[in-house]
Image: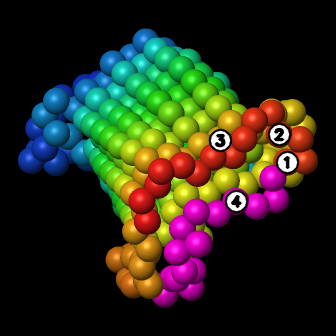
Amino acid sequence: DGTPGDNTIAFKDFLKCKLEKIIDVSIFTSGMARLADDTRLSASEGAVIYAISDVNHDPERSQNNQGQTLEVGSNCDIDGVIINGGGFRNNGFLVEKKTNVTIKNCRISNGKGQAILDYMSKDCVYARNSISTSYHGIQLWLSENIKINENQISQVKGGIWSACAQNVYAAKNLIHDCSDVGLDWEGGNNCISDGNTIKFCTNGELAVFSTGPELKRFNVPMGNLTHKNNIVVRAGDYLDRAGTKKINYLKDVGACMIYGNLDPHLIGPIIFENNSI
């Protein structure tokens, strides 16, 4: 109806449509669509959501928020939804201050927003999604108790990019062709990457950095950050979001695993263990 509000029924009805049936529907025109708490949204017939314009940027959610299509409520289960951002700042899911959200088997591409932006949410699972040609793949800000498993992420800026998150487990993801980092812990604690394959990332496939200046006020302690059992492939170039080959200037093996500017007081170690390069 073009006004902010609960768009749950509209999206449920739309996603019952078959893939080959083209429907011109204006579900929401002034910002992100919203799904109510306790919603299960499944595109069982393969419907595709196409964006036709930018979503207004709301810097209160995150300084790096580039615009998502759907704002997800607590206790939501999103399964098999396809979002094509149309090249706009309008693709993916925002999970803001929510609990118990699952996003799985979705395809998100062709947009300038983060495919999944988790902002201060807890107890969420992001699994078996295919993400490409987006701003970041999966971005966490001040999130807790998150599982990120078996996703395929390519041609983004940062693959899995975590800022001050706690208790994150990222396993068996395939990440490649990133113009920044592949899998990155920036501040936070008790985060583990385990058994991922990460290739062709210009600023390091595995990374650990200090808490960002904009997040220091939250006083999240840093430590117990681990990258283990991962497979890393380094090359002289990578593909950008447009599919164009770009030169990768970090060509030495040492640049595959990087850390720097750690917080002055750590509550536990920084571990790079049993990674294959």
- Say what amino acid the circle numbered 2 marks: Leu
- Residue 78: numbered disc: none
* 116 up-or-down from 241: above or below: above
Q: How far apart, in angstroms, are the residues tagged by discs 3 and 1?
A: 12 Å
**Mark 2 packing: few (<14 Cα in 10 Å), some, or many (20+)?**
some
Contact between marks 2 and 4 (CB within 8 A): the answer is: no
Picture residue at 55% right of the left edge, 58% below the top: 206
Query: Which residue is disc 1 drawn over?
Result: 263
Whole-percent x, y for residue 196 in the image: 40, 49
Query: Which residue is disc 2 drawn over?
Result: 266
Contact between marks 1 and 4 (CB within 8 A): the answer is: no
Q: Tag 1, which secondary structure? A: loop
Query: Which residue is disc 4 drawn over?
Result: 259
> Mark 3 vs mark 1: which is more N-terminal?
3
> Mark 2 vs mark 4: which is more N-terminal?
4
User: As rendered, which of 75 and 217 lies closer to the eye?
Assistant: 217
Contact between marks 1 and 2 (CB within 8 A): the answer is: yes
Looking at the rendered image, the quarter that the N terminus falls into is top left
Instruction: Let me know if residue 93 is in the magenta part.
Output: no
- Say what amino acid the circle numbered 3 marks: Leu
